[in-house]
Image (cartoon, rainbow, N blue to C red):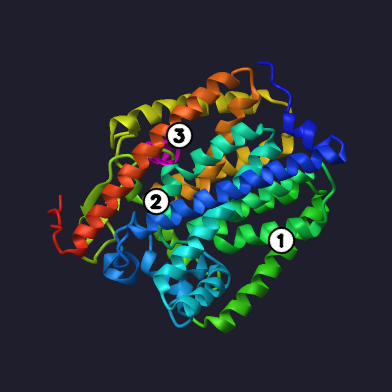
Amino acid sequence: MKLTSSVFDRQIFHSAKAGKVTWLWQDLLWVGILALVAGLISFGLAQSIAPMLFENPSWDVWFESDLPRSFANTIARSSNHYRTSVHPIFSLIAFPPTYILYQLLGDAVTAVRIVIALVASIWISILFYLLRLFGCRRLEAILFSLIGIFSAAAIFWFSVPETYSFGSVSLLLPLVVVAIGEYRQLSPWWYLLVSALSLSITTTNWMAGILATWVNNHWKQALQITVNTFCFVVGLWFLQYLIFPSSEFFLKIQSEKNYVFNEGSVSPWNVIQSFIAHTMVMPAIEIIDKTARPGFATPGIQMVTQLSLPGSASLWGKVAVILWAALLGLGIWGFFSMRQHPKLRLVLGLTILGQLVLHLLYGEETFLYSLHFAPLLVILASCSTLTRARPLALVLASLLLVCIGINNVSEFNRATERINERDRQAITLPAPS
């Protein structure tokens, strides 16, 4: 398959200085527009969720997440920050901006929603920039950025307080450094910073930082950067511990063995279909009684998708799954056929594979982690536009955007209606099966 030449490469990296400035300002304009759109979507969706969802621990119903703890950790120094055992310095990163907003506004819920909206704006800006660095034309970068923000993962996780929005950003930044490193020599400090950030939110996301460091540096220097990164994060964790005494060290992971080979994930096939399909297209959401599941002793309900069939929520969802499968297939074809960006493709491919293997072994509700790998799959699918099949890819992507927009927002509204119904004490728990 013959690949199209990269307009971005020619205009940005190999053109005259005036040409660079022209393209830079056009891209910055679109970054601003996309950031505004993502922030408004995040904040708007969050407005429809009952605050009790993350203010009351007994209401923890959102796909096995821990919204009450995450919410408390971002506004209260005295809350229990024990999950730093797997989210090393999340509190140190998320608490300061949220707490400052909280003090200014006097409303904790609004402060948290604004911070998550800002993270969504940063996320889509980085995704757009990465797509451009990968070689996508501006039209494709805009289109696939919108597909990213309307994915099921983004719709459901950029509207609630959790670590995954921050974690998704930490996975994208190492890819940016790898992409830029293919064009120019970067200081080792850049690799240390993005590697530290990838480790700081979720320990397993360090895979992206380590890969980014090792593909662009001699092995001795890469080893030194990796060791320095670990020491740097340990130092930051100690600072965090002084501020949040309930923090636990991030190598204390004995309790995580309870989530390895968890029978709740049912089978590898359920994990794979959730990883590929549910991440983009929200399926039918099942509401279950928590006490009917292994490991849950607290009465209450839980929203889950692990056993749902792809696209089962609506006709729009079924069409979207078909379109997504076709687009992703073209993207995989383009990914292995193209010759540009070998290091970036290597890091992207290994990170996606690493995330898939991780969740085949760890976790129960795969959709819980979907925002970590959703942008990686979007970038993979965008490779379809770098081939001669570009016209077909653009048609598929445009139709997909419409279908997921309708399906995912509709399912989000249904989910929030159930929560609001419970807020009115009108929800009835299903009997254990």
In which quadrant of the rendered image does the N terminus lie? top right
Does the magenta segment cover residue 186?
no
Does the magenta segment cover residue 271?
yes
Foreground: disc 1 or disc 3 = 3
* Horizontal and vertical percent position of residue 418: 23, 54
Amino acid type, residue under disc 1 in the picture: Leu
Residue at the image point whose x is 41% and y is 44% from the top: 152
Q: For residue 384, which quarter of the picture? A: top right
Residue at the image point whose x is 70% and y is 69% from the top: 232
Q: Going from the N terminus, do you reach mark 2 or mark 3 first?
A: 2
Q: Nearer the viewer, residue 429 or 363?
A: 429
Q: To which residue does mark 2 refer?
A: 156
Part of the protein shown in magenta: 268-279
| Magenta residues, dominant SS class | helix
Amino acid type, residue under disc 2 in the picture: Phe
In the picture provided, is 217 more to the left or to the right than 333? right
Q: To which residue does mark 3 refer?
A: 401
In the picture provided, is 179 more to the left or to the right than 239? right
Q: Is residue 243 above or below residue 232?
A: below
Q: Nearer the viewer, residue 433 or 17?
A: 17
Residue 193's disc is: 1
Q: Going from the N terminus, do you reach mark 1 or mark 3 first?
A: 1
SS at badge 2: helix
Task: Residue 306: tell me if it is visible.
Answer: no
* Horizontal and vertical percent position of residue 157: 43, 53
Q: CA distance from mark 2 to mark 3?
A: 16 Å
Q: CA distance from mark 1 to mark 3?
A: 34 Å
In the picture provided, is 51 more to the left or to the right than 373? left
Badge 2 crowding class, 10 Å Cα cut-off, few under 14, some 14 to 19, many 20 or more, is many
Q: For residue 225, which quarter of the picture? A: bottom right
Badge 1 crowding class, 10 Å Cα cut-off, few under 14, some 14 to 19, many 20 or more, is some
